[in-house]
Image: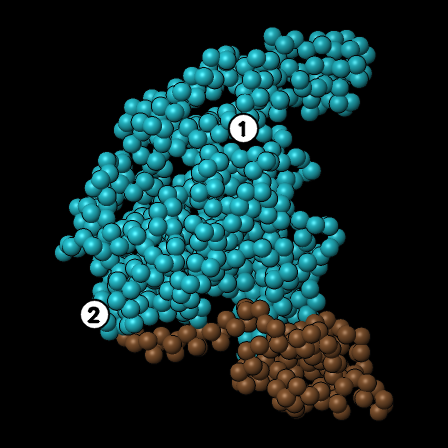
Amino acid sequence: MKSLAELKKIREEAANRINLRTAKNGYRVAVGMATCGITAGARPVLAKFVEMVSEKGLDNVTVTQVGCLGECALEPVVEVFDADGNRTTYAEVHVDDVATIVEQHLIGGKVVTDKTLEVIKKAK
Amino acid sequence: MLVRAQVLVCGGTGCLSSKSDKIKEAFVENIKALGLDNEIQVIQTGCFGLCERGPIVIVYPDQTFYSHVSVDDVPKICSEHLLKGRIYEPKAYKEATEDELAKIKSFGEVGFYNKQLRIALRNCGMINPFDINEAIGRNAYQALGKCLTEYTPEQVIDIMKKSGLRGRGGGGFPTGLKWELCAKNQADQKYVICNADEGDPGAFMDRSVLEGDPHSVIEAMAIAGYAIGASMGYVYIRAEYPVAVERLRFAINQAREYGLLGEDIFGSGFNFDIDVRLGAGAFVCGEETALIASIEGERGMPRNKPPFPAQKGLWGKPTIINNVETLANVPVIILNGWEWFSSIGTEKSKGTKVFALGGKIKNTGLVEIPMGTTLREVIYDIGGGCPNGKAFKAVQTGGPSGGCLTAKHLDTPIDYDNLVALGSMMGSGGMIVMDENNCMVDVARFFLDFTVDESCGKCTPCREGTKRMLEILKKITEGKGTLEDLDKLESLAHMIKDSSLCGLGQSAPNPVLSTLANFKDEYIAHVVDKKCPAGVCKALLTFVVTDACIGCGKCKRNCPADAISGEIKGKHHIDPAKCIKCGSCVKGCPKGAIVVE
C-alpha cells in the first residue's frame, strides 16, 4: 500500500463487513423464523432483506430474525420497528415483496398498507 | 447470501482458559451442520472485559449477550437463536448488579458497559485481532496516514501536548512532553519502545489491548517514531503472555505486508519497523532504565537518572518508552483532535483509564472509565459491589506499589493527583477490592512479599529494608508483634521510600503505610489483643467448642492433630496447644458448634 486512497478503499470494504456490529438507531426489520416461518419461505425473504439493505447502503437498518410471531397461517411475517419503537407487521411477505418494503418503508418512510397484517387478515 | 449475523467469541486469555477456542470451533461446526455457514460468520475477538461472566459470546446484529457459555450450550444456541431467531434464555446475560430476575439481553444495555467510555479498549471485543482489514475498517492507520501526509513532527507533538495525555503505566508523565524532549535531541538513530512488561498482580489491561487490538499499538508506535525521528521500535513484552505475543507478531507481519511498516510509508519517505523483545517476567523490568538494560542483553536493573532515556536510552541513543495503554490512545487523539480528548476527564488528568477490577467484587474484569469517575461508581455501579452481601472494607489501587483506600474515600473522583494525595496511586490500574473478611495486616504482608521477591537487589534500602519490613509484618501476623514494631515499621517505610533508586523501592512501602494510616486499629488488635478481627491470621485464632456441641465425636475423628478430647454425648474440648488451626473441625461439625475467636 502506498497511498491513503488505497487505505480508504480497504477501510470502506471492511467497514461494510463489520457494520453488523455497530449499534444502530434506524429501522429494525425482524423476520419470523420459527418452523412455520421457515416452511413458508422466510429464509429467502431474510436473505433478500439483507442483500437489499446492503445494496442500498442503508447503514442504519438492522435486519434480524425472531421466533414465532403467532400468525403461523400468514407467514412469512415481518415486523418493522422505527426508531421510536412503533411496530408495523407485514404478513405473507415473499421475496418479490421485499423490494417494495425496502423502497417504500425503509427508504421512503411510508408503510406498505396492502401488505400489513390487518389488511391481509381482513381480506381473508 | 450475504452475511446476516456474526457470532463473536471472546478470545482473551481469561476466556481462552475456559476453553473459548473449543466454543468457537463448536459454533463453526454447528453452523455448518445447519447449513448456515454462508450467512453466519464466527469471529474470535479480544477481551470483552466482563471476565467474571466468561466465556462470553455476542451475537450481532441483535447484540445478544451470552455469558458463562460452555461447549455444550453451543448446539442449543445455534438451533434456537441462529436458526429460529429465539434467544436461548438460559445463557442470556443476567444483570449482576440488580435484581437477578431482570434479564438483560442486549450488549448495549448491560450496566457493566453503560458507565464506561472505551477509548483504549475501543476495538477489544469488536474485531478479529488476526484480521488487519477489520482493524482498518475501525479506522486503524488513518491517524498514521494523517500524520505523515498532513502534519509535521512538531505538529504531532503539539497535538499530543495539548491533549493532556499522561503515561498510563504508572508514572503519569505527560506523553507529549516526553516526545518533545526526545525529539529535541539530535542523533543518527532514535528508538521507540513500547513497555508491555505488565507486572502488577491482577492487572491485565496491556495484555488485553495487545490481544484484542494489536494494530492500535503498532500504529501509535509509528506515529511516535515520526514525531521524534525514530525509525525503529521495540515492544518489550513478557514471555508469559503467549497469546498477546502471537497476535502482536502476526499483526506486525500483516502491517509489513500492507506497507504500513517498513520503508517509505504512504510514500512519505518515512521508514519505521518494529521488533518484539521478550522479557522473563521480572517486575523491575517495567522500570524504564531496567527495561532498556534488559533489551540490551544486560541484567535488568535500574540506573541513575539523568541521563534520561530521552537523552541516552537504548544503546546510548535517544529513546522514548510508552506504555501499551498510553499508545492505544494516540491514534484516536490524532483522528478526533486534542480538543475532544481534553474535554474528557478532570483538569489535570485527561481522557480515560482502564482498571482491572478484581478481588471481592461481583463483576471481575476490565473497565475503562473517564477520569473523574468516583471509586463508588466503579466499585458499585460497574463492579456490582462485594459478592455474598459482605461489607466493603477497602480498595487497593495501583497494585503492590499502591495503597489501600477505605469507605470514606469512595466518593473521590479518580485521577492521578487525587489518588496520590490519599497515599495511593493510579499505578498501571489494578483495583483490588477487599471486604470484611480481609485482614489488612495480611494484605500488606501479601504485597510486601511480592516486592521482596521482585526487588532487583541493587540498592540496600530496597533489598534489605523490605525484607526487614516483611519480617516485622510476619511477626505481627503471628501474634508476636509489639507496639514498638509498629513505629519501627513506619520509620523503615519512610527510609526505604526516601533512599531507593527506582520506583519499585520508592513505592514498595505504600501498602504498609496506607494500611497503617487507615487501619491502625487492626494492627493494634494484632499487637495488643493478639486477635485478628477479620479471622485471617491463623496464629491469632482460637477454636472453641460451644454448648451447642452434641458430643457426636466427628470433630475428634477429623482432627489431624489429636487436639480434641471428649466422650460420646458429652461436650468436647480443643487443646489450644495442640491445635494447628486447620479448620477441619469447623467444616465437619453438623451443629456449627465450633467457633473461631
Q: How far apart are marks 1 and 2 (CA)?
A: 57 Å
**Chain seen in brown:** A
B59 lies above or below B590:
below
Residue for point 44% across, 71% down? B137
Q: Position of residue B589 (x, y in %)?
A: 73, 22
Secondary structure of the residue carrying tag 2 is loop
Classify residue B294 as left or right of residue B203.
left
Secondary structure of the residue carrying tag 1 is helix
Residue for point 65% across, 8% down? B575
Q: Where is residue B2 in the image (x, y as percent from the top left)?
A: 54, 79
Q: Name the residue under label 2.
A: B269
* Disc 2 chain ID: B
Can residue B235 be seen in the rendering of this structure?
no
Amino acid type at image mark 2:
Gly
User: Crowding near pointer 1: few (<14 within 10 Å), some, many (20+)?
Assistant: some
Residue for point 29% across, 64% down? B155
Amino acid type at image mark 1:
Asn
**Chain seen in cyan:** B
Q: Name the residue under label 1.
A: B518
Can residue B307 be seen in the rendering of this structure?
yes
Q: Where is residue A95 in the image (x, y as percent from the top left)?
A: 66, 88
**In this orientation, which residue lies closer to the viewer: A18 or B360?**
B360
